[in-house]
Image: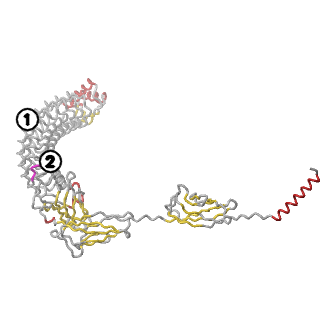
Amino acid sequence: MNNKTYLFALLSLVLLWNCGKDDAPSLPKNNAPNIVPQNYTVLENITDNQLIGSVKATDADDDELTFSISQNDNGLFEITKTGELSLATGKVLDYDNKTQHTLTVAVTDGIDDATAQMTINVTKVEPENLSPSAEPQNFSVSEDISDTHIIGTLVATDPEDDTLTFSIVEDTDELFEITDTGELSLLEGKILDFETKKEHTLTVEVGDGNISVEFLVRIIVIDNIADDPDSFITKWQVNSGQEITIGTNPDYNYDYTIDWGDGTVEEITQQNPSHTYQDEGTYSVAIKGVFPAIQMSSSDHISRKSLVDVAQWGTGKWQSMYRSFYACQSLLTFSAEDTPDTSEVSSMQETFLFSDNFNGAIGSWNTGNVTNMHKMFFDATSFNQDLNDWDTSKVTNTSFMFYNAQSFNGIIGNWDTSNVQDMELMFLSASTFNQDISGWNTGNVTNMGGMFTNAFSFNQDIGGWNTGKVESMEEMFRGATVFNGDIGSWNTSNVANMRSMFMNAAAFNQDIGGWDTGMVTDMTYMFLGATNFNQNISQWNIGNVTSIGGMFSYASSFNQDIGGWNTANVTNMIGVLNGATAFNQNIGGWVTVNVTNMNQMFKNATAFDQDLGSWDISSIATMTEMLDSSGMSFNNANATLIGWADYVQQNEGPTDISLGMQDVVLCGMGADSALGILINDYSWNITGFDMQFNLCP
């Protein structure tokens, strides 16, 4: 194409474009979407799959709109493209935390956008009101209550703990009224009568202000058991507002009616019933039914102190008297005119333990099946009754029975003790007791330890007792200061323990030289303080005895030949003759090979003057104060010390021994040499001696 032709074509095209622009219609202008603020109200328990609402927007061009959240509230919400607003996945609302949320929603038509604020108002979800509930209720009440007595307080529960209000719906007998709070009582002027009607039933309504439910209340009328001869009746002295607990025995089942004496009557099966008294006073408590045992040790100190009397025993068969009146310190006696049926009782252990003011007449009790009287009157310091008619034929244990029963001097000589095995500490500190019990059969007794310890008045003839099975006579007459019965014929062949047997038995001085002591292992303190004892016991076999410590300490009259005793097994000779001011027998032949302790052995034995130099002291560990203030002359003191020094030299010991020789005179070169050997060569510590060279050549 030449240039002229090209220019013509271009001009024609320009002319054609100009003509078209002037004549064709223009394109329409786009309108932005329209969205306004919107409010939504939802419950706080809405879930993330529930619709809060559909956000509304319009578009003049009817363009397709797309929604999104431009400003969220902590990511709490989400919206679909079509405007469906909901909680974001896993999110929840909480009215108590925030009651209103705002967010900004954007909408677009593809060309233009618009935004608006959305407000979500959260409403609290109120829980559905649930009805109160109440179970049928029973009350037992004495027929003689007044119209002011509260029969009981009804019980109902409400899931929301709403305040509940009670009212009577039906009372066919028209006898009762109830307060809003559920306290049930008789209508003013109304009374109950057991003979007329034994049971009343009410229909009671309880409501929470929205919902009410009905339930039955049964009032059981109890005959006045306080007047019933079958009832067990006790008396209690209480303060205002005080609670008492009646102790029971957990080994038995209970099912009884109890009248607390203030108008309250209950049916009880549980252990240790308790009750609180509004007013101060003395109340009679009546019990009728299955009540096999009272055991006040299961109660508390205040309750035990409040029990003042048993006014009636009733007709129930008691199964146990174990700790029945334990520590009932206000219980002085029983005013009951009847007698308890104790025919099935096997245990009277600790019945009156610590009841230190009790002195009730119980001599008519049936004890025919009782086997255990251990500690029955332990510390019952006021008790002194005649128990001579008691049947004790099945009793096996009377240990501690009258322990510290300081007033007791009742007649018990008729007791059948043929089955008793344990009489340990039976009369310990029964300081008044001095009854004839010579006829007791003690043939099965194995333990008489401490039986008359500190029984300061006892001095009866018990020489005929069968002691053939007794294994322990430890402390049997310790402190029995007037006892001097002839017991020389006792069979002691099985006795292993005579420790402290006559300790401080100041009057005792009977011939017991014929006793068989072959089984005895312990004679410690046996005659300590037995100031009158001076009998020939030279023939005793003490071959099994390991301790004679303090055996004759302060036995100020004793001076018998015991030099032939077999002491081969003795390890303890501490204080054997300490203060035995009359003793001066030759015991130089004693076998002392096993003795470890000779402390105070002859201390203050002012008459003792014997040569002990031949003793085997190989096991000795201490001789502290051994010869202090003894009566040993310088001749025997010299001989003793020289003999021991020779032994120590020959056997290379013992060493490091403390030997007391206070006020003992030594003299001469032999004694001086012995001292040198013992002190300097073998580290003995010898104290108190008086060396006087001029007394000896």
- x and y percent of residue 95 in the render? 50, 63
Q: Nearer the viewer, residue 635 or 425?
A: 425
Which residues are the magenta region? 366-370
- SS class, disc 2: loop
Q: Nearer the viewer, residue 210 or 34?
A: 34
Mark identifier at residue 514: 1
- x and y percent of residue 541 in the render? 13, 32
Left or right? Give the position of 515 relative to 2. left
- Seen at 23% across and 76% down, the residue is 188
- SS class, disc 1: loop
| Residue 580 in view (yes/no) | no
- Please check the rendered image and state whether residue 359 is part of the magenta-colored stretch, yes or no: no
Q: Is residue 271 above or below residue 450?
A: below
Specify the quadrant of the image occupied by residue 67. bottom right
Q: Amino acid at mark 1?
A: Gly
- Check disc 2 and report the residue beneath it: 372
Q: Nearer the viewer, residue 336 or 287?
A: 287
Can you name the residue that lies furthest to the top here? Answer: 650
